[in-house]
C-alpha cells in the first residue's frame, strides 16, 4: 500500500530526528558545556584548558567513581531569573495551563513561553547528583506569578509544576535559635529547597506594596526578608600549628529591596525592610574577620550610570494615589545603593575605618534587568575630596586592574539574565569554595543558556508529528493485515509489491491490464484482477516478473 510505504519512510527519518533533538533539548547543559565552576580551574589543568572546560570535565568526573571532592565547590547556587513562563499574559484556567498554549504560539510565534521541559532541562545539572552539598534555586523576582494583584491558584499550580516538589520546601527558613548550619549537611533536603526573592510582579513597587500582597507572597513563597549562615567544616589548625584560624563562614541575606526607596505607600512595610536591614548590619561579623563571605539575594539592581548595563537609571512615581510612592524603578537610588555597599558590606571611601574601608568579601545577586549584567562597584579612596561610588562592567574592571588596586575597595554585582526564551533561556551557576592557602572564600559565576523558546516548540511539535505518524502507520498496518489474510495473499507481500512499484516507472495499470493479462497467473491473482483495480494490475505485474524471470520488467525490478 503506497500510503503505508510513505509513512514508513517518513518514520525512518522522523524517529531518529526526534530522538536526537529531544535528547539535545533535555540534556542541553551537557552539549553546551555547562557546569558549575570548579575550584580546580585555577590549578594545573587550567594552564592547558579553559576554566569552562576544566569545570565541565570535573563535573563529568563527579559522576564517575574517580570523583574528587576537592574539585567540586561545596556551595553551588542555581539561579533563575524571571520564571515568566507566560510572558506577561495571564492564565485563563488551570486546565488550559496544563497543555502547551498552541494558540499563543501561533499568535506570537511562541511568545515568551517555555514549557515544563525547559525548566527540567535547566535543572538537569542538579537533579541526579547524590554528592550535591548545597543547591539553592534563586528565583529572582517571580515575574511569572502575576503582575502584582492577581496571583491566583492557577499560577501557583503552574509554579509547582515547574519546580516539582521543590516548591513545598520554599518556606524553608533557618530554625529559631540555630546560629549556623553546616555546609554539606542535609544534602537531600537541599536538593529541593528554593529561595524565592520578591519582585515587582509579586508584590509591586514601593508605592503599591501593601499588607495583603506581602501576606500573599509570604504564604505562597516564604518570607521576603531573612538570612542564613553556614559554617564549612574544616581543619582550622594552621599548617605550622601556631594558631587557630577562623571557621569559614557563609552568610546569605535574602532582602526585599522593593520598598527600600521612598516614598513608600505602606510605611509599616518599609519599616520592616529597614528594621531587617539594620538587624543584618548590627549582627554582622567584624569587617576584619577572615574567611567570611556574604551573598545578598535581592531583586532591584544597584544604582549605576546610564550605559553600564542595558537598563539605565529610571524612576517613576504615582501621582495622587499610593501616597505618591514609587511606581516603577530600574535601579535603587544612589543612597540606597551606598547603604548596601557601606552598610551590609562595610566598605568605605575612608581609609581610617576598620579594615581600611575594604569591608567584607561577598557578591550581590539580583534580577529585574532582563538583559542581565556583570558589574563592579568601587570607590576610589585616593580621589579626594568627594569620594563617590562608581560602577563599571566587571570584565572591564578586571582588564584595567581596578579590582586589584590597593586603595580601591569594590564589590561585584551579578544581575541575572532572564530565563525567558527571548533572552536565551538563561540559568546562572554560582560556585563558592574555600581556598585554604589564602584562608578565604572564592567564587565564580557562569551563564548557561538554551536558546530561544522556539527550539522547545519545534522539538515538541516534531515529537508530536512523529508520534502521530507512528500511530497512523500502526493503525493502517493493522487494518490492512486483517482482510488480507483470509484471501491467502500474505506470502506475496503487499509491501514488496508496493515497494517495487515505488521504484519502477512502468506502464500505467490500464495499459498493463490490456496488454499482458495472461492465464498463467494463479487463482488469487485472478481474484484481484477481476476487481480491475490498479492494485490488482500491479500484483500481476510483480507476479509475472517473478515467474517469467526475465520479462521486460526484469531490469527495472532489479533496480530497487
Ligand atoms: C589539622 O591540620 C594540622 C596541620 O596541618 C594537622 O597537624 C592536624 O593533624 C589536622 N587535624 C585533623 C583533625 O585533621
Ligand atoms: C583614583 O584616584 C586617583 C587620584 O585622583 C587617580 O590618580 C587614579 O587614577 C584613580 N583611580 C581610578 C581607577 O580611577
Image: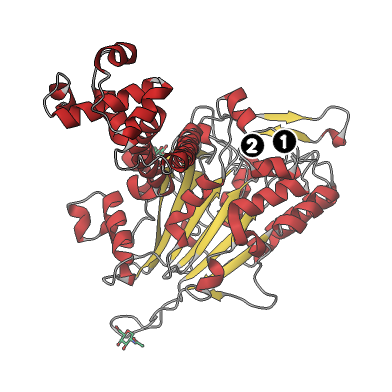
User: Is disc 1's CB within 8 Å of ligand 2?
Assistant: no
Based on the displayed image, in which of its 4 quarters is residue 44 positioned?
bottom left
Say which quarter of the image contains residue 60: bottom left
Disc 2 crowd rating (10 Å Cα; few below 14, some 14-19, many 20+) is many
Q: Secondary structure at mark 2?
A: loop
**From the viewer's perspective, is 464 left or right of 170?**
left
User: Which residue is drawn at the image coordinates 34% and 12% (left, top)?
Assistant: 510
Query: Which residue is more in the foreground, 215 or 246?
Result: 215
**Residue sitting farthest toward the front:** 519
Rendering coords of residue 15 (x, y %): 37, 41
Q: Is residue 555 above or below residue 12?
A: above
Label 1 residue SS: loop
The alpha-carbon separation of the residues under discs 2 and 1 comes to 7 Å
- Is 211 rendered above or below residue 422? below
Tags 2 and 1 touching, CB below 8 Å:
yes
Residue 200 shown left or right of residue 303 in the figure? right
State which quarter of the image contains the N terminus. top left
Residue 346: image location, x then y, percent: 55, 57
The residue wearing badge 2 is 86
Task: Indicate the position of residue 133 as horizontal and vertical percent values.
Answer: 46, 69
The residue shown at (64%, 77%) is 178
- Where on the image, by quarter, is ligand 2? top left
Q: Quick one: 327 or 171, which is closer to the camera?
A: 171
Residue under label 1, please give it: 90
Amino acid at each position: 500500500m503506497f500510503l503505508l510505504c510513505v509513512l514508513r519512510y517518513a518514520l525512518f527519518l522522523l524517529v531518529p530526528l526526534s530522538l536526537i533533538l529531544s535528547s539535545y533539548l533535555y540534556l542541553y547543559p551537557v552539549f553546551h558545556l555547562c557546569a558549575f565552576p570548579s575550584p580546580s580551574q585555577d590549578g594545573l589543568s587550567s594552564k592547558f584548558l579553559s576554566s569552562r572546560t576544566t569545570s565541565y570535565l570535573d563535573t563529568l568526573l563527579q559522576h564517575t567513581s574517580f570523583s574528587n571532592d576537592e574539585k567540586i565547590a561545596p556551595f553551588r547556587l542555581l539561579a533563575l531569573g524571571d520564571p515568566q513562563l507566560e510572558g506577561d499574559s495571564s492564565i485563563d484556567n488551570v486546565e488550559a495551563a496544563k497543555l502547551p498554549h498552541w494558540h499563543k504560539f501561533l499568535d506570537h510565534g511562541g511568545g515568551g513561553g517555555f514549557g515544563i521541559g525547559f525548566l527540567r532541562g535547566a535543572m538537569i545539572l542538579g537533579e541526579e547528583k547524590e554528592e550535591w552539598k548545597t543547591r539553592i534555586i534563586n528565583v529572582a523576582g517571580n515575574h511569572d506569578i502575576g503582575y502584582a494583584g492577581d496571583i491566583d491558584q492557577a499560577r501557583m499550580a503552574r509554579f509547582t509544576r515547574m519546580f516539582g516538589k521543590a516548591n513545598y520546601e520554599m518556606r524553608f527558613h533557618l530554625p529559631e535559635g540555630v546560629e549556623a548550619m553546616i555546609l554539606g549537611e542535609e544534602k537531600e533536603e537541599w536538593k529541593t529547597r528554593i529561595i524565592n526573592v520578591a519582585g515587582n510582579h509579586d508584590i509591586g513597587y514601593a508605592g503599591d506594596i501593601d499588607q495583603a500582597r506581602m501576606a500573599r507572597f509570604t504564604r505562597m513563597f516564604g518570607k521576603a526578608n531573612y538570612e542564613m549562615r553556614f559554617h564549612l567544616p574544616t581543619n582550622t589548625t594552621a599548617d605550622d600549628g601556631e594558631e587557630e584560624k577562623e571557621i569559614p563562614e557563609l552568610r546569605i541575606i535574602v532582602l526585599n529591596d522593593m520598598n527600600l526607596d521612598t516614598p513608600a505607600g505602606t510605611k509599616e512595610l518599609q519599616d520592616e525592610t529597614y528594621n531587617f536591614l539594620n538587624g543584618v548590619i548590627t549582627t554582622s561579623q567584624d569587617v576584619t574577620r577572615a574567611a567570611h563571605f556574604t551573598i545578598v539575594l535581592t531583586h532591584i539592581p544597584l544604582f549605576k550610570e546610564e550605559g553600564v548595563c542595558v537598563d539605565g537609571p529610571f524612576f517613576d512615581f504615582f501621582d495622587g494615589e499610593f501616597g505618591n510612592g514609587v511606581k516603577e524603578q530600574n535601579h535603587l537610588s544612589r543612597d540606597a545603593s551606598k547603604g548596601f555597599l557601606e552598610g551590609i558590606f562595610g566598605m568605605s571611601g575612608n581609609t581610617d575605618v576598620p579594615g581600611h574601608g575594604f569591608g567584607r568579601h561577598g557578591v550581590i545577586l539580583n534580577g529585574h534587568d532582563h538583559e542581565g549584567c556583570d558589574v563592579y562597584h568601587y570607590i576610589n579612596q585616593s580621589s579626594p575630596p568627594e569620594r563617590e561610588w562608581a560602577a563599571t562592567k566587571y570584565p572591564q574592571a578586571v582588564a584595567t586592574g581596578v579590582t586589584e588596586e590597593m586603595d580601591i575597595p569594590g564589590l561585584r554585582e551579578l544581575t541575572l539574565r532572564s530565563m525567558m526564551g527571548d533572552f536565551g533561556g538563561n540559568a546562572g551557576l554560582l560556585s563558592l569554595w574555600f581556598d585554604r592557602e589564602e584562608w578565604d572564600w572564592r567564587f565564580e559565576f557562569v551563564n548557561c543558556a538554551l536558546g530561544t523558546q522556539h527550539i522547545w516548540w519545534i522539538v515538541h511539535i516534531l515529537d508530536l508529528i512523529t508520534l502521530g505518524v507512528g500511530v497512523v502507520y500502526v493503525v493502517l498496518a493493522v487494518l490492512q493485515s486483517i482482510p488480507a489474510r483470509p484471501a491467502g495473499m500474505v506470502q506475496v507481500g503487499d509491501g514488496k509489491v508496493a515497494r517495487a512499484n515505488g521504484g519502477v516507472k512502468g506502464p500505467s495499470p490500464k495499459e498493463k491490464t490490456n496488454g499482458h493479462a495472461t492465464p498463467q497467473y494463479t487463482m488469487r491473482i485472478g481474484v484481484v484482477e477481476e476487481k480491475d483495480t490498479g492494485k490488482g494490475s500491479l500484483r500481476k505485474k510483480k507476479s509475472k516478473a517473478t515467474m517469467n524471470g526475465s520479462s521486460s520488467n526484469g531490469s527495472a525490478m532489479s533496480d530497487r
